[in-house]
């Protein structure tokens, strides 16, 4: 179950060509079961209709400061008091300037004046406007007041030019809102290191030995930890996934590179979660040129790679978690891994089961704890599995008085 379920989100939409992308932000928040209310400026209505947001949220869209409805004109206070989190996406230079200077001349700007909830902005504008000194000064002022700014991307802009100012991806905006809106931030102040994805071990400049890991489970763990307030470092093997928002990502390719990155980042970590499918063996030699198909058969001599989890366990953090992806004798192998590596928890899954393991959005796992308790979880999304693992991390850290109970 999403930790955004039932959280009250006000989304402001302003007059930018990228206003149509706000519909995807709303869709993402609703998919996470948040309760969303949209406030539009009049200018936003030139780009996207209020009926779009009303259909997506199931609620009327607020536009006018003093609507002709017989209301008392206190909608700005009511919305601000109702919200758990407020986001503006897209945020124009105009609304940024109003917020920075305490101006309120329409519904959205007065909502922001009355707002005491956590707030984030996703600016969108031409790169010339984005780099304007006044705009940057206003953003710095807002950051100093605790407003979270989701920086725009570099890319193709509305007038055909390229530059900074393109609205951040809707899924990144949803992640930023989710981080702000988490109900308790039970991992705030904690550092969490996650490894994810496969490794690729070169045979020659063209071919490699790898596995089917997509990295989805590890990335879900990193997102779940960030949403709960942790400072997260993700060491990721080669995947096609977008870097999680609010997470420091170090990309690696080989088992050796992953080992170096994990060991370089382990100091100061409160929890380390090794979800990567690291190659156990690599080719003993790598051909300097592409090997041509001139032989009827080919034998590769393989060399064992370093045991990263064992090295981390030798100087273990307060919480250490491993994953066991198995095809046979799974529970016995996972229990052995728990004991041999001195782990707090092993997350075991049978990768031959339908809906579990590699290249899927779902998983079926068993949590095996060092005190002997085991818990089999039903088929569910990898995001939900990740949140259950983070429940275990938070409980372990509280019990060891790493974080307040």
Image (cartoon, rainbow, N blue to C red):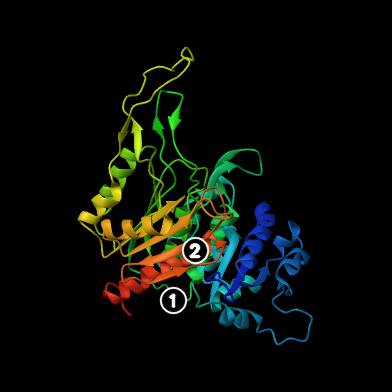
**Depicted 259 relative to depicted 101: above or below:** above
Left or right? Give the position of 223 relative to 188: right
Q: CA distance from mark 2 to mark 1?
A: 19 Å
> Residue at coordinates 26% horizontally, 48% vertically from top-left?
263
Q: Residue furthest top?
A: 294
**Residue 105 is at least partly visible in this image:** no
Q: Which residue is mark 2?
A: 385
Residue 278: image x %, image y %?
Answer: 38, 44
Left or right? Give the position of 359 relative to 400: right
| Of residues 359 and 84, the one drawn nearer to the viewer in this rendering | 359
Q: Residue furthest left?
A: 315
> Residue at coordinates 68% horizontally, 60% vertically from top-left?
23
- Identify the image quadrant of the N terminus: bottom right
**Depicted 252 relative to depicted 174: above or below:** above
**Depicted 30 relative to depicted 202: above or below:** below
Residue 368: image x %, image y %?
Answer: 38, 65
Mark 2 or mark 1: whose residue is earlier in sequence: 1
**Depicted 355 relative to depicted 202: above or below:** below
Q: Which residue is mark 1?
A: 184
The mark lying in front, picked from 2 and 1, is 2
Left or right? Give the position of 23 relative to 233: right
Q: Secondary structure at mark 1?
A: loop
**Residue 225 is at least partly visible in this image:** yes
Left or right? Give the position of 350 relative to 368: right
| Of residues 44 and 82, the one drawn nearer to the viewer in this rendering | 82
Q: Secondary structure at mark 2?
A: helix
| Of residues 175 and 148, the one drawn nearer to the viewer in this rendering | 175
Residue 137: image x %, image y %?
Answer: 45, 58
| Disc number placed over residue 97 in the picture, else none | none
Residue 379: image x %, image y %?
Answer: 56, 63
């Amino acid at each position: 179950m999403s930790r955004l379920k039932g959280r009250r989100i006000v989304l402001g939409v302003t007059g930018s060509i990228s206003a149509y992308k706000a519909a995807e932000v709303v869709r993402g928040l609703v998919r996470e079961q948040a309760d969303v209310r949209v406030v539009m400026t009049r200018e936003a209505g030139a780009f996207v209709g209020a009926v779009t947001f009303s259909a997506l949220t199931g609620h009327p869209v607020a536009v006018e400061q003093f609507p002709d409805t017989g209301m008392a004109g206190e909608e700005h206070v009511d919305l601000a008091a109702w919200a758990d989190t407020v986001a503006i996406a897209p945020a124009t230079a105009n609304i940024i300037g109003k917020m920075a200077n305490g101006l309120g001349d329409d519904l959205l700007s007065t909502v922001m004046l009355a707002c005491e909830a956590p707030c984030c902005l996703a600016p969108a504008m031409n790169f010339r406007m984005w780099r304007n000194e006044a705009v940057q000064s206003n953003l710095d002022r807002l950051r100093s007041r605790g407003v979270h700014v989701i920086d725009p991307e570099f890319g193709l802009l509305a007038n055909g030019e390229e530059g900074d100012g393109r609205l951040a991806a809707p899924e990144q905006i949803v992640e930023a809102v989710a981080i702000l809106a988490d109900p308790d931030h039970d991992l705030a102040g904690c550092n969490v290191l996650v490894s994810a994805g496969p490794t690729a071990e070169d045979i020659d400049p063209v071919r490699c030995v790898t596995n089917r890991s997509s990295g989805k489970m590890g990335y879900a763990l990193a997102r779940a930890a960030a949403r709960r307030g942790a400072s997260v470092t993700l060491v990721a093997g080669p995947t096609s996934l977008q870097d999680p928002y609010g997470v420091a990502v170090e990309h690696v390719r080989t088992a050796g590179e992953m080992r170096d990155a994990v060991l370089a980042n382990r100091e100061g970590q409160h929890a380390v979660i090794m979800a990567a499918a690291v190659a156990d063996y690599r080719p003993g030699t790598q051909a300097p040129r592409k090997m041509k198909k001139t032989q009827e058969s080919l034998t590769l001599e393989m060399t064992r790679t370093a045991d990263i989890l064992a090295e981390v366990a030798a100087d273990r953090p307060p919480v250490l978690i491993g994953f066991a992806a198995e095809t046979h004798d799974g529970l016995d192998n996972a229990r052995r891994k728990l004991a041999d590596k001195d782990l707090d928890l092993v997350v075991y899954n049978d990768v031959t089961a339908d809906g579990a393991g590699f290249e899927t959005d779902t998983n079926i796992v068993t949590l095996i704890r060092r005190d002997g308790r085991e818990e089999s979880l039903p088929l569910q999304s990898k995001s939900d599995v990740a949140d259950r693992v983070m429940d275990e991390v938070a409980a372990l850290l509280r019990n060891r008085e790493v974080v307040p109970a």
